[in-house]
Each structure stands twice: as structure tokens, then as C-alpha cells.
Image (cartoon, helix red, strand yellow):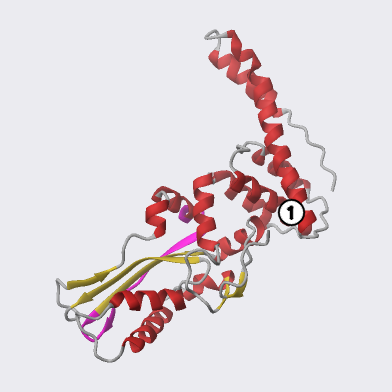
Amino acid sequence: MVIDVKIDSSGKIADALVDTLSPVTNLFGTVGDKVRVYRELSLLRTLNRAKEIAKKENLSLTEPPTKFLVPYLEECSLESGEDELLTDMWARLLASASVDFKSEHNLFIRLMREMTGAEARVFEYLVDPCKDREYKGPWHLDDIETSWHNPYIYLKLEDCLEKLGPDLSKNTDFSVCEKNFKAIAETPGSRVYFFYVNYGKEGKYPLDAIYECGPSMIEQEFDIVSVAMLKSLGLIGDYISTEFWFGEFMFEVRSYYVTTLGARFAEACTGYRVSGQGQQLGANT
């Protein structure tokens, strides 16, 4: 695939900046050159990365439709070359569209345009099949959204409690229950950020707080605004359970999960596989 890169719009951008800032300083006459060089270098980094991916994964690239290519070149040239993760995601999007173009690739340009490195890292943490995970079973990102529904979560909690034995009490180590729950529910593409146990009678409040998990990695390492951004883009969802009662104990669970759209986005724009068995499959490269 041969791509002739020409970015003429930078001249208009530079003229507008000079008109706005003059006569503050004559040094801004070099803005046009700086903008043009910045965008061209950024674009070249992405194209070179796409070429590396194609070579390593033995992909045969063909030129995608102009309707995709023109906005793609325009938008990805605005990214900072210093953010390797974003560069990689833009490159993978191009490679994906050049192998098997779908209409969703046009949408992914708009989604990538709205993302910063902060959102990219949150999304990467969600889809990483290995990091900080206990889950060992089979998984597929397309199935994640449907798995986070109350009936399924209730059954998984029930299974975890059976392993603790029939005699639950306030002295039960519910951290074991939390760990077991994550091992069977926290598939790649999802992260539990809230696990809460109360004691009392259903319909009688207030309840006694028995157990609450510590701050999740998402709460500790990432900006909650970035999580909100990914939710607004439709790439992730926020599961908040109903009250699950088991005898005198009430459980609440909350998680972030990749939506169906997010699964398709991950397949096109990340190096992580979208299905596998436990932790056997990680990044493609």
C-alpha cells in the first residue's frame, strides 16, 4: 500500500494563528513550519509503526477507501509522537482497515480523536488479559457485556459462598469470597472496583457493614474523568448490582466492562487478543 502524505491544511492553520497573535511578535511567522513539521513527523511515526505491525504479523495491506484514509491522515497527524500507546493504536487502526475494511473503522477514527493517552491507558488496563488477574477460564471480549447482568452475577456469588461453607458469620473472611469471585467473574475486558458485604435483614435499614474491598487499581492509578470519557464514548459500561441477599448477608458488586462496541474497538486498535483461555493469550506483539 503506497500512501502519498500531503498536509496542506497546516498552512491555513498557521495563517490563522499569525493573524490572531500579531503584532505580539514576529517570531510566529515560523508557526506554519512548526505545525507542518509536527504533523508530518507524527504521521510518519504512525505509518512506520503500521508497517512494522504488518511485517511482524505477516499482514497484506491494501489501501482502504478514501472516505477512511483522508480523515485518518488528518486526525492521527495531530497526535503527539511522544505517546507510544496512542501511536500504536492509530497504527493498528490503519492496519486493521487495510486488511479488512468495515464501516466501523470510520467510527473508530472519531473515537480515537476524542481519546488522550490517559483514556488509552485505562482502556488498555481493561482489555489486558494478564495483568492483575486471577481468571483462568475461557473468554471472548464480545461476550463481556452480556456476562455482567444480575442473574449471572448472583449465580457466581452463590458458587463462591458455597466454597466458604454453610455457616456464614460476621467472622467469615469475605476477602476469600472476593478473591474467588474475581477468579470466576473478572474476565479480560472487565475489572471489579467495588465488593461490599452488609449484615442485617432484607428491607430493614441501616445495615451493618461487614466487608468492603480496598481501592481498586483503576481508582488508584487512573483519573476517574478518563473512565467517564470512555463511558461517554460507549467503549465501556458500568455495572452496578442490585442487592444480593444470602440469608442475613447482603452483597453489592460493581465493575467496569468493555461494551460490544469496545470489543470491536479493541480488536481493531489494540495489540491484545479478543479471546483465549485464562492467561495463555496476551498481546499480539
Look at the image and say whether residue 62 sits in the magenta stretch. no
Q: In the rendering, at what x and y percent does residue 66 appear?
A: 77, 46
Look at the image and say whether residue 240 sits in the magenta stretch. yes
Answer yes or no: is residue 234 visible. Answer: no
Name which residue lies at 83% across and 57% down.
60
Q: Is 282 or 199 nearer to us in this picture?
A: 282
3 vs 234: above or below:
above
**In the displayed structure, does residue 225 sit left or right of residue 51?**
left
Amino acid type, residue under disc 1 in the picture: Ile
**In the displayed structure, does residue 159 sit left or right of residue 22?**
left
- Determine the image quadrant of residue 168: bottom left
| Residue holding disc 1 | 53
Answer yes or no: is residue 258 visible. Answer: yes
Q: Is 194 or 112 nearer to us in this picture?
A: 194
Name which residue lies at 44% across and 53% down.
227
Q: In the rendering, at what x and y percent does residue 64 appear?
A: 78, 51
Which segment is the magenta one? 231-249
8 vs 228: above or below:
above
